[in-house]
Amino acid sequence: MKREELVEGLREICTKVIKTAEAKNKDYALEDDAFSNFRIIGEFLNIADPGLEDGKYMCWLVYFCKHFLSVLNYLRTRKVYTESIEGRIIDMIVYLAILYLMIEEDEK
């Protein structure tokens, strides 16, 4: 792959990432809190360290690991059973961006 093709491919991936994030966030988050799903499920499952109040991060980790395991299984077997591997990778990128933004928000 040439460098120009790499950059163009990255642009296409970024567009897919934004479209996926926009679509899925509408299903999972409250209108005024983009991270509400992580907070609510983290509290519901009681997976937070009380001193850190990190339930949203533990919830994020569970969601991310689900996709990670799917990609790992694909790499081992080259088989997919439901969602495409490309879709799983896009989801992982979305989740990494969400983590970045959650950390950024908490550091303000």
Image: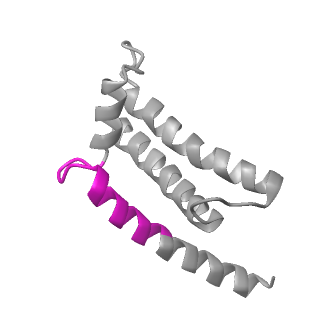
Against 75, is 50 above or below? above
Residue drawn at (49%, 51%) of the image: 95
Q: Identify which residue is drawn at 43% across, 40% down.
A: 103
When the figure is inspected, residue 3 is found, relative to residue 94, above or below; the finding is: below
In this rendered view, identify the residue nearer to me: 84 or 96: 84
**Residue drawn where x is 64% and y is 59% of the image:** 81
Report the magenta stretch's main SS: helix
Corner quadrant of residue 86: bottom right
On the picture, is 16 further left or further right than 21?
right
Side of 45 where 73 appears, left or right: right
Quadrant of the image containing the C terminus:
top left
Q: Is 66 situated above or below 42?
A: below
Specify the quadrant that holds the N terminus.
Answer: bottom right
Q: Say whether residue 58 is magenta.
A: no
Question: x, y percentage for residue 3?
Answer: 76, 82
At which x and y percent is residue 56?
Answer: 38, 33
Q: Residue furthest left?
A: 32
How many numbered badges does the structure rendering display?
A: 0
Q: Residue furthest front?
A: 81
Residue 76, how many percent across, how many down? 82, 51
Q: Residue at x 42, y 21 (%)?
A: 47
The residue positioned farthest toward the top in the image shown: 51
Residue 43 to residue 72: above or below: above
**Which residues are the magenta region?**
17-34
In magenta stretch: residue 19? yes
